[in-house]
C-alpha cells in the first residue's frame, strides 16, 4: 500500500529494495513513514524552472549549502540553472531515499 | 551528500570561480566587453541579487575594498568562502580530519532553522533593494 501511493518519490531500481525492507518492518514504524514528508520530484522541477536561478529548488529539497552557492553566483553563471532542470528530479528522489533510510534505521 | 562529493564539489566550484574571475580580469584590462551570463537580467532587464559579485571580487583582489562595497556587498562573503574553504578542505584531506564536513553539516542545519532562514532572506532582499536603488539612480 505504501509503495503504491509513494512509488513516484523513488527511483525504479530502489523500489524492490524498499519493498523488502517494508516487509521486515515493525508495525509501529509505519506512523513515522507517514510523517517522513517526502518531496515530490515534479514540484521540485517546477520550482527549478521558476526559481532555479536563485537556488530555491535546492533550498526546498534540503541542499542548503548548494542553494547558497547557486544564489551567490547568479545561478552558477546561468549554466548551472539549466543543468539543474535535468538533475533536480533525480536528486529529489535520492534525498527521499536517504530520508526513508533514516526512518527505517 | 557524502563527504567526498561535498569536497569535490567545493574544490571544482572554487576552481571554476577563480578561472571566471581571472578571465573577467583579463577582459577588463584589455578593455573588451564582459559577457552577461545572468538569466534573470537577460529576461527581466533588472539585475539579480548577486549581479555585480564578479566585479566586486575583482575589486577585492586589486585591493579596492571601497569600490567592491558599492558594486555588491555579497562579494565579501564570497571572497572569504573562496579563500578559506579550499584551503580548509585540502588541510582536512592532508591530515585526514573531518572538521570541514562537520562545519558544512552544522551550517546547513543552522540555515534550516526558520528564524535564521527568514533573517537571511530579509538581509538578502535589503541588499538587493540597495543594489537596485543604486542601479536605477
Image (tube, coloured by chain):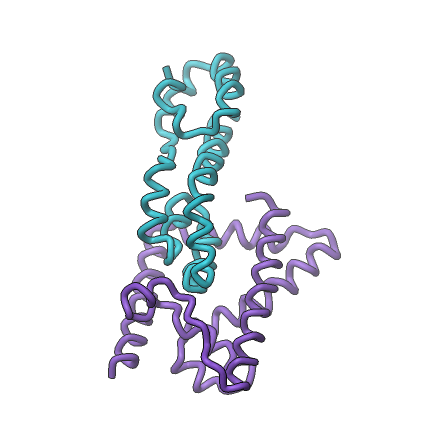
Q: The N terminus of chain A is located in which quarter?
A: top left
Q: Colour of chain B?
A: purple
Q: Residue at x 46, y 33 (%)?
A: A99
Location of residue B105 with respect to A7 vertically, above or below: below
In the picture, residue B85 is in which quadrant?
bottom right
At a point 42% along the width and 14% down the height, the residue shown is A27
Task: Tell me what residue is drawn at x 38 percent, y 82 percent.
Answer: B70
Horizontal relation, residue B111 to residue B125: left or right: right
Residue B28 x %, y %: 51, 83
Residue B79 in picture, x, y percent from top left: 52, 72
Letter of the cyan chain: A
What residue is rendered at 38% in x and 48% in y?
A: A57
Q: How far from the left and from the top, in percent, is residue A23?
A: 48, 12
Question: B124 or B117: nearer the eye?
Answer: B124
Residue B75: tell me if it is visible: no
Residue A3 seen anywhere in this rendered image of the structure: yes
Q: Residue furthest right?
A: B94
Left or right, residue B17 beside residue B40: right
Q: Is residue B4 above or below residue A92?
A: below
Residue B100 picture location, percent across and down: 61, 55
Number of residue marks: 0
Amino acid at each position: 500500500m505504501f509503495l503504491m501511493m509513494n512509488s513516484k518519490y523513488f527511483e525504479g531500481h530502489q523500489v524492490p529494495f524498499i519493498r523488502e525492507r517494508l516487509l521486515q518492518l515493525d508495525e509501529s514504524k509505519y506512523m513515522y513513514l507517514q510523517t517522513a514528508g517526502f518531496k515530490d520530484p515534479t514540484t521540485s522541477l517546477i520550482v527549478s524552472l521558476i526559481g532555479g536561478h536563485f537556488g530555491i529548488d535546492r533550498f526546498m529539497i534540503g541542499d542548503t549549502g548548494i542553494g547558497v552557492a547557486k544564489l551567490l553566483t547568479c545561478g552558477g553563471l546561468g549554466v548551472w540553472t539549466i543543468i539543474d532542470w535535468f538533475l533536480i528530479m533525480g536528486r529529489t528522489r535520492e534525498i527521499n531515499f536517504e530520508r526513508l533510510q533514516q526512518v527505517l534505521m | 551528500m557524502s563527504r567526498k562529493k561535498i569536497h569535490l564539489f567545493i574544490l571544482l566550484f572554487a576552481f571554476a570561480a577563480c578561472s571566471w574571475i581571472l578571465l573577467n580580469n583579463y577582459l577588463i584590462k584589455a578593455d573588451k566587453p564582459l559577457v552577461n551570463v545572468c538569466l534573470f537580467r537577460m529576461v527581466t532587464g533588472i539585475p539579480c541579487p548577486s549581479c555585480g559579485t564578479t566585479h566586486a571580487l575583482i575589486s577585492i583582489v586589486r585591493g579596492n575594498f571601497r569600490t567592491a562595497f558599492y558594486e555588491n556587498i555579497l562579494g565579501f562573503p564570497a571572497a572569504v568562502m573562496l579563500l578559506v574553504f579550499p584551503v580548509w578542505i585540502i588541510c582536512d584531506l592532508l591530515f585526514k580530519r573531518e572538521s570541514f564536513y562537520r562545519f558544512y553539516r552544522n551550517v546547513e542545519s543552522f540555515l534550516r532553522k526558520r528564524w535564521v532562514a527568514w533573517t537571511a532572506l530579509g538581509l538578502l532582499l535589503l541588499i538587493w533593494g540597495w543594489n537596485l536603488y543604486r542601479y536605477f539612480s
